[in-house]
Amino acid sequence: MKIEIMGTGCPKCIATMANVEKAVVEAGVDAEIVKVEDIAEMVARGVMMTPAIAIDGEVKAVGKIPTVAQIVDWLS
């Protein structure tokens, strides 16, 4: 499983990364977590606000910090 955190490193992006890391542990899944900072790549994928999360290529959240529980639900 590949989880991409899209953002430029703002505090919301850092908080999103922390929630994703906690959710991966909580869900007990094997996942590669990747940080995407290239704005052109984000725009090409339809992401106009950050932070954003994509799981296996599917964008799940844009412009908000999802809770650990939400992320665990997506991973299940």
Image: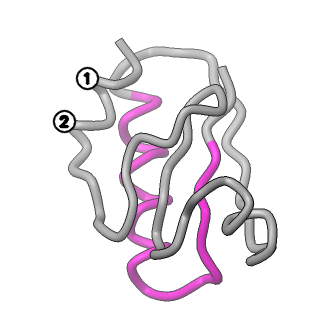
Q: Residue at x 79, y 63 (%)?
A: 41
Answer with left or right where residue 31 lies relative to residue 11.
Answer: right
Label 2 residue SS: helix
> Which residue occupies the extreme bottom position in the image?
10
Q: Is residue 19 inside the magenta stretch? A: yes
Q: For residue 11, which numbered disc appears in the image? A: none
Tell me if residue 63 is in the magenta stretch: no
The amino acid type, in three-letter code, at marker 1 is Asp
Give the residues drawn in magenta, as a range.
4-25
In which quarter of the view is residue 58 placed? top right
- State the quadrant of the N terminus: top right
Using the image, determine if residue 26 lies above or below residue 23.
above
Locate residue 51, reporting x and y percent: 46, 69
User: For mark 1, what is the residue?
Assistant: 73
Q: Main secondary structure of the magenta part?
A: helix
Q: Is residue 12 left or right of residue 41?
A: left
Location of the C terminus by quadrant is top left
Q: Pointer 1: residues within 10 angstroms few (<14), some, or many (20+)? A: few
Q: Residue at x 80, y 73 (%)?
A: 40
Other residues around mark 2 within 10 Å, as few (<14) / some (14–19) / many (≥20): some
Residue 69 circle label: 2
Please say if the residues under marks 1 and 2 sit with CB atoms less than 8 Å apart.
Answer: yes
